[in-house]
Structure formats: structure tokens, C-alpha cells
Amino acid sequence: MSNTIYRSKGSFRYRHIHELKKDIEELELDIKVSNNTDLFETKVDLGDCIIPNSIVSLPMEGGDSNEKGSPTQLTYRKYEKIARGGAGLIWLEAVSVSKDGRSNDKQLWLTEDNWIEFKKLNDLIKSSAKEEFGEDYNPITILQLNHSGRYCKIKGKSNPIIATHKRDLDNRLGIDEDYPVVSDDYLKGLENEFLKSAKLAKKAGFDGVDIKACHGYLLSELLSAYEREGEYGGSFENRIKLLINIIQRIKEDKECEGLILASRLNVSDVLPYPQGWGMSKSGEYIIDLEEPKKLIEILKDKGVSLISLTMGNPYFIPHINKPYDIGTYIPDENVIISCNRLISEIGKIQRQFPEVNIVGVGYSWFRHLAPYVAAGSLENGLCNLVGFGREGIAYPDFAKDILRDKEMKKAKVCISCSKCSEMKSKIGTCGCVVRDSKVYLPIYQEMKREEN
Ligand SMILES: Cc1cc2nc3c(=O)[nH]c(=O)nc-3n(C[C@H](O)[C@H](O)[C@H](O)COP(=O)(O)O)c2cc1C
Ligand code: SF4
């Protein structure tokens, strides 16, 4: 990530909802707006458990574990705030399933030796939420399990583990064409790593696990391994095989009984075929949902009851995945168009699968107007639950304010300045530099001093 910062076209400038509505109409966007904020109170029935409202705090990797992968005071502090913030579903950040699959040495990593620390984390979330909202209140917790693939780092140095070559992504990381791809045996072995982590997550008390297949990490990369040879590449069935096998193994394992099966999936990589999943095979820059829809049908049949949809690759085209006002380059589209892409494509999936609980994303950029955009999505069937990522660290009690006061406060919202992303990419550890400045501004400043 370079040090230069750029302001995106069409940065946020709306004071009132009618100004936003005007732009939505003029630009003929699919974004919907509604004042019906009561919709956030809708409970979501997952069969064995109930999500107490329709608001989700999305995963935000904080890079604050100790060297063994256990949560530290920073981790506990973040999740206690989120728990007290009132989101009905707390989707915890990416936790590595193996030592070599970590995104950096400070990424959480769940093992036989530290599962009890993760239990403490889950207990803290549950007890803090009960203290805040009463004994009967039970937010649902999902632990995101991941292998970082080409974005693995050891001791601050990139250590890519790739399933297939992708020209543009390889170039960005300095991977040459002779760099080895992992073997089929390595991939097969990951079934055990994910299963082991799922069993530990269950033991630690989490309600469910997310088998993560988004944002260009290993399972996500496999979805577009069109050019890989062997068991995990080429055909659609081969490319989804590892994800499906992991889910099947967890489903069948007695020790995982009762765990909610979830997945965070890219609906499209928004990189031209053959580099990207969910794109037209013509090689043009056109999203094609045929394969993602086929996969969701299969996941549904396998008992996956929650799917959080997202897009793009935060290391390569971050504006697609987390639309921003300030970042490392100027996207070739207005920010509202990036938000519209997320909301609209996710909506197409939710409308085709109304029985699947899809978590939508793309709302944080709307700042204090986000509740009305999110309510518009719920009202119009664009998603069953609305997810917020950066607000979770900028404004952890955003859900409480939406549910209780029917608004988000201007002085507390995320301003999409990308400083948390900059920290994540450079030092691993990150938080909100703007709204949680007492803790994260000194870390950010120290990072900047070391750069100079
Ligand atoms: C610093 C940072 C860390 C993130 N960590 C994760 C993560 O661990 N897992 C994940 O699936 N997404 C992660 N995301 C993506 C967010 O969950 C979310 O999809 C994205 O920020 C867009 O939502 P928003 O506009 O509400 O922020 C991260 C985003 C940022 C900025
Ligand atoms: S640093 Fe804070 S305000 Fe800036 S993008 Fe991250 S969460 Fe938002």
C-alpha cells in the first residue's frame, strides 16, 4: 500500500435523505430507501436458534493476537464493545485454521492449546450482551475459519500459498510463473484442519462456523481455479470440491452437532475471467451469477443456513469490497456506484433464494443515512439481514442506536478514510484511528514514524 492518499469521485456529501434519493433516482440505481426502521427488530429463525434482530456486525480482522494465536486484551476489548452494541449476529473475524495459513503473526489462530481462550472470548460476548439487554438476550456468534492462501505472511514477509496462478494478482505480489502451486494432497489435508477448528469452535461455545470463501483467500481462489490441473481445478465441481467437502465433514461429525453452518462467499471477484469467479466467460468486465447461484443451491442443500455475501479482493480492488472516500487510488466510478453494485448483486441472489438467510453489505459508506438504506434493503427483499463491517470498530453501538433511537449519530459514524485498512495491510494490527483514537491513533502514528 503506497503512502499517497486519494479522494474518490462522488465522496459522501448528503445531509438529508431526500438528497440521497434524488441521486439514486437520477443515476437509476437499485438501492432502496425506507423509513421503516422497525424492520431491524425482525428476529431471524435459524431452526435451532433465533437471531434476536436483523443487524449483523461483520468480521473485522484486528491482528491483535499473541504469537500463539490467542486473543489479547485488545481482542476482548473490541468484542465486548461489539457485544454491548446490540447486533443480533456477531460474525467474528478471520481465524486461521493452521500456522502456515495465517495472514500475519498476529492473526487469531485456534488450536488445541488455546481453545479455552476463545471460550473466554465467546463467554465475554454472551455475558456482556446479557448484562446490557437482559438475561433472555442471546446474540448469535459465528467464528470465521480461514486459510489466507496467497495473502499468508510470516514474520512480516509475504509467504504466498497459491492454488492457481492469476496474472494480475501474481504481478502485484511479485510471484513469477515458476512459483509452485500447492498440491492436491495439501488441499485434501485442509479438510482435517478446518474440521479440527470447527470442533474446537464448538467446544469453545460459538454458535456456528463460517467456512470462508471470499476476498481472494485460498478457498475463494479455488472457486476460480479454471486453469488448475487435477482434482481441484477446471470443472465447476472440482473448483467447489474443497469447500463442499469441508462443510460435509463438519456436518457429519458428532462433535460438531448443533453448530450453525455458515459461509462468507464472494458473489463475484469482479476480475475478468479467467482470473475471477462470478464473471462472464467472454472475458469482458461483466458479472455473471450463474455459478455463484449454483453453488448457493448446493450449500443450501448441505444445510448451510447463513450466507454472508461480499465481492472483490481487498488487496487488489478495495473500492469494490469496501467503498471508500479516501484510499490508495481513485476508483474509476463514483462511490455510490460501488455501493450499488454490492447491494444490487446481493439482492439478485436473495430474491432467487428467499428461504436462505443472506447477509448483505455495502452500508457503512452511507454514514448517518445507512439505517434508511439498510431498511430499504430489508423492505425490498434485497437481503434478510444487514451487515456492517467498519461501523463495528468505528461505532460499536451502532445497532443499539438504530434499534432504540431509530438513527445513527453523525458524530460516531465511520468516515471511510481507509486508515484501518492501511494498518491491516502494513502492520496487521488495526482498529478505528478516527473514532477509537485513544487506542489506535498512537499505533497508527508509530507505524507512520517507522515508515519515514
Ligand atoms: C480492517 C478491515 C478488516 C477486515 N477483516 C475482515 C475479516 O476478517 N473477514 C472478512 O470476511 N471481512 C473482513 N473485512 C471486510 C468487512 O467485513 C466488510 O465486508 C467491509 O468492510 C465492507 O463493509 P462496510 O462497508 O460495512 O465496512 C475487513 C475490512 C476491513 C476494513
Ligand atoms: S479508520 Fe475508522 S473511520 Fe476510517 S475507515 Fe476505518 S473504521 Fe472507518
Image (spheres, helix red, strand yellow):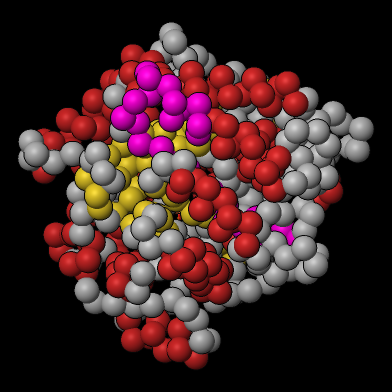
- What x and y, as percent, mark residue 208? 36, 34
Q: Is residue 3 above or below residue 177?
A: below
Residue placed at 24% from the left, 77% from the top? 35
Foreground residue, 228 or 364? 228
Left/right of residue 339 with respect to residue 153 in the rendered view: left
- Work out whether residue 13 can be spotted: yes
Left/right of residue 305 with respect to residue 29 in the rendered view: left
Left/right of residue 435 with respect to residue 233 in the rendered view: left
Q: Is residue 305 above or below residue 131?
A: below
- What x and y, as percent, mark residue 267? 57, 57
- What x and y, as percent, mark residue 42? 20, 59
Residue 256 lies in magenta, yes or no?
yes
- Work out whether residue 78 can be spotted: no
Residue placed at 45% from the left, 48% from the top? 300
Residue placed at 38% from the left, 19% from the top? 254
Residue 378 lies in magenta, yes or no?
no
Please report the bounds of the magenta region as a residue range: 247-272
- What x and y, as percent, mark residue 87? 26, 48
